[in-house]
Image (cartoon, rainbow, N blue to C red):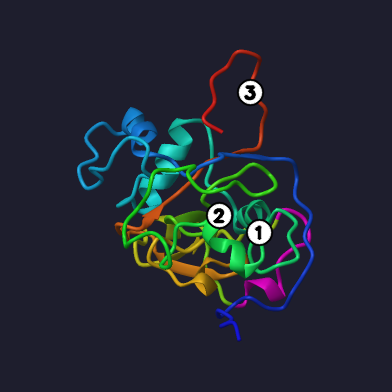
Amino acid sequence: MLFRSQGESPPHRVALSPFAISAVPVTNGLYRLFGPGHAPSRGADDHPVTDVTWYDAVVCAAWFGCLLPTEAQWEFACGAGSPHEWCCDEPSLCNYAWYSENAAGTVQPVGTREPNSLGLFDLHGQVWEWCRDDYDAAYYSRAPGQDPVNLASPASWQTPQRHRVTRGGSFCSLAEMCRSRFRFHEPAGFWARDLGFRLVSTGLPSPGEGHPC
């Protein structure tokens, strides 16, 4: 029997405008272009950047001309249309995710498990990923049907204790916490060795223009 996290109901349909999402989490190598002095994360360039607060992630994403994914964007990208709790059936999860069963308690190079049907890697396990939304367990009961995102007033952005959504599980998470629908949250000023982020763009780059998404 699966554990259902607080805030996963009621089930509801949403429509999303087109967006692009990075195929892997932001890596140390990419993050160092933005913050060369990022001391806590000393991993290899091909490992996900960690030890970043929600504020760090938001500012880095903006520096690259991107955003953090909304919760709805993230869940759509993770599930990739699968009827299962993950992008695959549970026995196959180890092929798609670095999690408690196979990661040996540490972060791994990105893109080394199989991609989901959208060609995206590491959405299950590896590192928790910050989303743009404020966390509210009751949000699904009032969420709009088009491009939902739960954003508080700008004044709350300066409140490090305000919780923001994190998704996906990490290298030390059980399978149930890596589910596409599992909702978690941390204070915006929190950072950890298993918490990172990925980038989203809602516009298409011009021909020849570099874009991390």
The residue located at (70%, 76%) in the rendering is 141
Circles 2 and 1, Cβ within 8 Å, touching? The answer is: yes
Q: What percent of the width, then of the height, locates residue 93?
A: 57, 62
Amino acid at the residue labelled 2:
Tyr
Depth check: 32 or 83 in front? 83
Q: Quadrant of residue 38?
A: top left
Judge from the rendering whether residue 47 lies leftward or rightward of residue 65; answer left or right: left
Residue holding disc 2: 96
Q: Which portion, as a residue range, is magenta?
A: 138-147
Estimate the spatial distance between the alpha carbons at disc 1 and disc 3, rounded to whole Å: 28 Å
Name the quarter where the N terminus is drawn. Answer: bottom right
Q: Is disc 2 placed on a helix, strand or loop? A: helix
Amino acid at the residue labelled 3:
Pro
Q: What percent of the width, then of the height, locates residue 84?
A: 70, 67
Q: Quadrant of residue 105?
A: bottom left
Point out which mark residue 205 bears.
3
Depth check: 53 or 154 in front? 53
Residue holding disc 1: 87
Q: What percent of the width, then of the height, locates residue 91?
A: 60, 68
From this view, report whether residue 56 is shown above or below residue 76.
Answer: above
Q: Is disc 3 placed on a helix, strand or loop? A: loop
Q: Earlier in the sequence, mark 2 or mark 1?
A: 1
Q: Which one is closest to the eye, mark 3 or mark 2? A: 2
Asked if one can make out residue 44 in the rendered structure from this viewpoint, the answer is yes
Circles 1 and 3, Cβ within 8 Å, touching? The answer is: no
